[in-house]
Structure formats: structure tokens, C-alpha cells
Image (cartoon, rainbow, N blue to C red):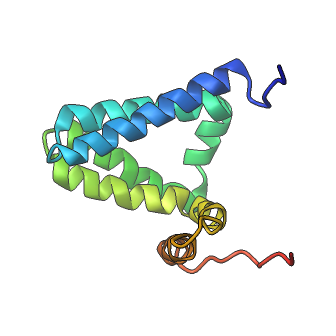
Amino acid sequence: MPTMWLSENQKIGVVFCSAGGLFLFLGVLMFFDRSMLAMGNILFLIGLTLIIGFQKTLAFFSRPHKLKGTVAFALGILLILLRWPLTGFLIELYGIFILFGDFLVTIGQFAGNIPVVGPYIKTALETLAGGRRNAELPV
């Protein structure tokens, strides 16, 4: 059986991040259920830390150009915990777009290969990322 390029901790981190995304989705689906959103945030942060490591996670969130996103993300989590789930989630969503906006283009490049809807997903994600398009690679 071939080995994967992920370590055991990183595999567990992927599961935690996936569960966090699922809990966030279910929290929104259940009309911004505070406990589901809080659990999703906790699982996502634990998973991210397991995937890239504690030092790199700390460095990622403390970058000067990402400070606005970090503050918005933390304020959103705090507002969710203080029983303001809708407001907290919207502020947190803004922080996520600031923090992870660079990855949206990469996800869009991958999703662009999906038949029929791929180009639309790619265009939407590039628009959400603020027009930061990667140069098209020649085929």
C-alpha cells in the first residue's frame, strides 16, 4: 500500500478541519445555532494547528497584513460565544475571507476542471478573492 504525503497528525488535522466545516455548515443550516458554530470554530482551529503546526499557525495569524482578518475572526468567535451568533458569524466570515482569500484562487483553479459548472465556480471564487488571479499556465 503506498504511503501518503501526510503525517498521522496532519491526517487527524484534516478530519478535525472537515468536522469543523461540517459543524459550521450545520450551525448556519440550523438558523445560526450558537453551540454548533462554536464547536465548528474550535474543531477548525484545532485541525489547522495539527495540519501546519503550532508555530506556523501562530505565524499565519500574526502576520501584519493579516491582522485585520485575525481580529475580525477572533471577534466573530467571541460574539458567537457571547450569544450573538448571526453578527458573530458575519464578522467571522469577513475575517475568513481576509485570512484565507489567497487560497480561494487556488481552489478556483482546481474547481475549474469540473465539467459544466467548473468555470462558473472558478470565476465566482476569483471574484470573492478580490480579483487576485494567478497567471494561466500554458497547457
Measured as percent of width and height from the top left, residue 4 is found at: 78, 28
For the question of whether residue 68 can be seen, the reply is no
Task: Give the vertical position of 68 relative to 52 (above or below).
Answer: below
- Residue that lies at the very extreme toward the front in this rendered image: 115
Q: From the image, which quarter does the C terminus lie in?
A: bottom right
**In the image, is 9 to the left or to the right of 90?**
right
Quarter occupied by residue 59: top right
Q: Closer to the camera, 97 or 2?
A: 2
Q: Residue at x 57, y 80 (%)?
A: 131
Measured as percent of width and height from the top left, residue 72 is found at: 37, 55
Task: Give the vertical position of 105 relative to 55 (above or below).
Answer: below
For the question of whether residue 51 can be seen, the reply is yes
Measured as percent of width and height from the top left, residue 111 is found at: 60, 63
Q: Residue at x 54, y 73 (%)?
A: 116
Q: Closer to the camera, 60 or 16?
A: 16
Q: Residue at x 82, y 23 (%)?
A: 3
**In the image, is 14 to the left or to the right of 68?**
right
Measured as percent of width and height from the top left, residue 126 is found at: 55, 74
Q: From the image, which quarter does the N terminus lie in?
A: top right
